[in-house]
Image: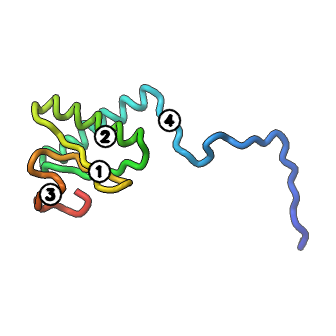
Amino acid sequence: MGGAVVRDLYNVRLRAAEGGPTPLSEEEEQRTRAVLFHELGNVIAERGRVRFPAYSPPERRRLVEVAQRLGAHWGQQVFVTAEDECALLLHLAGHGPESTAPGPPGA
């Protein structure tokens, strides 16, 4: 039993973009934006700001679009500020990164 087990693999192909995110379908994208609109909108309405992860350009574009929709819905601009390469801050005027508004960690 000490020998190595060898298995023959036939018709095995590498997938493109191995380990990368798969793009969302149009329906999934619409549902994702709707959930973000409601969830992030509730936090912004309560605290004036929310920090949210955005690791890729499509995720950043999605958050910018959600901020624009929230701004149109509320009749006031929702600003988007990159905090670092992994997160965006969506905030109302006076609640941006330069403000000292208290909030829980990650808010």
The CA span between labels 3 and 1 is 13 Å
Depth check, mark 3 against mark 2: the one in front is 3
Residue plotted at (25% across, 50% down): 89
Disc nearer the start of the sequence (2/4): 4
* Amino acid type at mark 3: Glu
Residue 85 at x, y percent in the picture: 37, 54
How many badges with numbers are in the image? 4
Disc nearer the start of the sequence (3/1): 1
Secondary structure beneath disc 1? Answer: strand
- Marks 3 & 2, CB-CB < 8 Å contact: no
Residue 33 at x, y percent in the picture: 33, 34
Secondary structure beneath disc 3? Answer: loop
Depth check, mark 1 against mark 2: the one in front is 1
The CA span between labels 4 and 3 is 35 Å
Q: Any mark on residue 98, and which?
A: 3
The CA span between labels 1 and 2 is 11 Å
Residue at image mark 1: 82
The CA span between labels 2 and 4 is 16 Å
Depth check, mark 1 against mark 4: the one in front is 1
The CA span between labels 3 and 2 is 20 Å
Vertical placement of residue 31 versus 40, above or below: above
Depth check, mark 4 against mark 3: the one in front is 3
Disc nearer the start of the sequence (1/4): 4
- Marks 1 & 4, CB-CB < 8 Å contact: no
Residue at image mark 2: 63
Quadrant of residue 35 within the rendered picture: top left
